[in-house]
Image: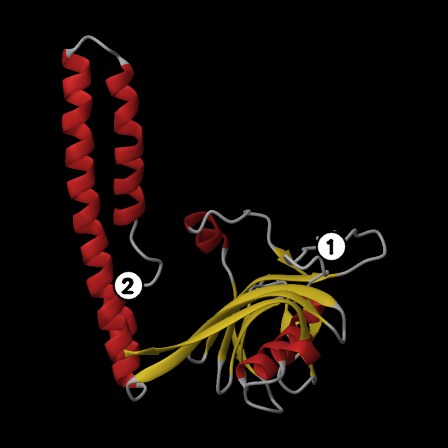
Amino acid sequence: MTDSVSICPNCRCEIHFPINDANVFECPECVAELTWDGQNIIGMVTDRQFNLMTEEQRINRRFSTAPYYDSHLLPHAVDFANSILDGGNKKEQIFGDLSRQMNTQNTLLESEKQLRFNRGVSVVVFVAISIVSVLILMDGSLFGLCCFIPGLWILKVAFTPPEDSYEGLLQLASEVGGSFEAGTVKGFSREPTFFTQFRWKHTNVEFSIIKEILDTDFILAKEGYSSGGGTQ
């Protein structure tokens, strides 16, 4: 069987993988668990778990189904993610957006209560809009049908389930000592230069984009202005 040579994202040693034979292999140098899909390394487990978003996950989250992965950049993307998660200086590492938050059992419970409250309010608003719509229709105006649209939209927004269930987040917080950090990154690594988008939850990192910047690519920078007229 023909082998393919890839670089371990953790220790940078060369490893021979069997082409078209998907499996999980152990790096002989650093003992990292590497997920091989038959063509490329798509995941790694060390003290953190790194994965590339699957096609099914892309569909569920309404991402483009075309994966933007330059597999040879995965080791650099892993280093980049580790530096961000370890609390590095954003300005020195990334040109783009970075958000991070600490989730505790108390904040998660408060968020769940707020979600339930918002859903209750949305039901009340929908009922009120429905009554008004029916009264308008009884007067012979079809405009009442249009009144249902904002009510249905409010219900849809309120009852769309969050991507991560609160039960799962609370269980994770309990397992790791009461709190964990989560965040998202979308931007350009400075050295080497590439575009990436990933999110993390405790020690689990998921990449949705790892894209090399080529000479043929165009980057559009949008300027903003403060009320004083200065460029931001």
Residue type at mark 1: give it. Answer: Ala
**Left or right: where does residue 192 sit relative to residue 103?**
right
Q: How is the image coloured?
A: secondary structure
Q: Decide: is 133 above or below 211.
A: above
- Foreground pick, 147 / 99: 147
- Residue at the limit of the structure toward the front, as seen here: 228
Q: Position of residue 134 (x, y in %)?
A: 15, 20
SS under mark 1 = loop
Q: Position of residue 39 (x, y in %)?
A: 63, 63
- Residue type (three-letter) at the residue carrying disc 2: Ser
- Residue at the image point whose x is 30% and y is 22% from the top: 146
Which residue extends farthest right? Answer: 215
**Image quarter in which the N terminus is found:** bottom right
Question: What residue do we see at 65% from left, 58% from top?
Answer: 226
Left or right side of 71 for 170 = left
- Residue at the disc numbered 1: 221
Whichever of labels 1 and 2 marks the residue nearer the N terminus, that label is: 2
The disc at residue 165 is: 2
Secondary structure beneath label 2:
loop
Spot occupied by residue 142 in the image (x, y as percentages of width and height): 26, 12
Which residue lies at the image location 59% right of the left edge and 48% below the top edge? 66
Query: Does the image show residue 16?
Result: no
- Which of the numbered marks, if any, corresponds to residue 107? none
Q: Is 120 left or right of 198, judged from the image as shown? A: left
Disc 1/disc 2 C-alpha distance (Å):
36 Å
Kindly indicate the quadrant of the structure image that contains residue 198: bottom right
Identified at 71% across, 55% down, the residue is 223
